[in-house]
Amino acid sequence: MTKPSMRDVLKPVELLAIAAVFAVFAGLITLMSSRDILLAVIFAGVAFIAGLVFLALFALTVKPNKIELDEINREDGDEGKPPTML
């Protein structure tokens, strides 16, 4: 079994960090405009969750290339079969 690359390991952390940036931005804008901390926290939470959902949907739209399809088939134990689209 091969170890995943550092890029594969850090991909979820990158998505969480981008969603956190969305949350901080929305929270700061809300805090500066309304001066209500509770409202800013609520908007930050909503922005974080919405950012995670949208980033996950965007990540699902990426089609794997031939190398990735070969790797997926190799991990599934289908070496003799031609690569198929998922």
Image (cartoon, rainbow, N blue to C red):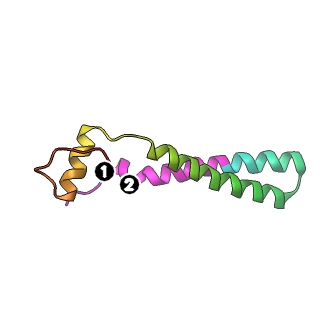
Label 2 sits on what residue type?
Val
In this rendering, is residue 1 above or below 10? below
Q: Is residue 2 magenta?
A: yes
On residue 9, which mark appears? 2
* Left or right of residue 47: residue 5: left
How crowded pointer 1 is (Cα within 10 Å; few <14, some 14-19, many 20+) is rated as: few
Disc 2 secondary structure class: helix
**Which residue is nearer to you in this view: 62 or 18?**
62
Q: Residue at x 83, y 50 (%)?
A: 31
Point out the image quarter for the N terminus. Answer: bottom left
Answer with the quarter of the image where residue 66 lies: top left
Most common secondary structure along the magenta stretch: helix
**Which residues are drawn in magenta?**
1-22
Q: Is residue 12 magenta?
A: yes
Mark 1 in CB contact with mark 2 (< 8 angstroms): yes
How crowded pointer 2 is (Cα within 10 Å; few <14, some 14-19, many 20+) is rated as: few
Q: Residue at x 41, y 40 (%)?
A: 62
Disc 1 secondary structure class: loop
Q: CA distance from mark 1 to mark 2?
A: 6 Å
Check disc 1 and report the residue beneath it: 5
Q: Residue at x 27, y 44 (%)?
A: 68
* Left or right of residue 77: residue 51: right
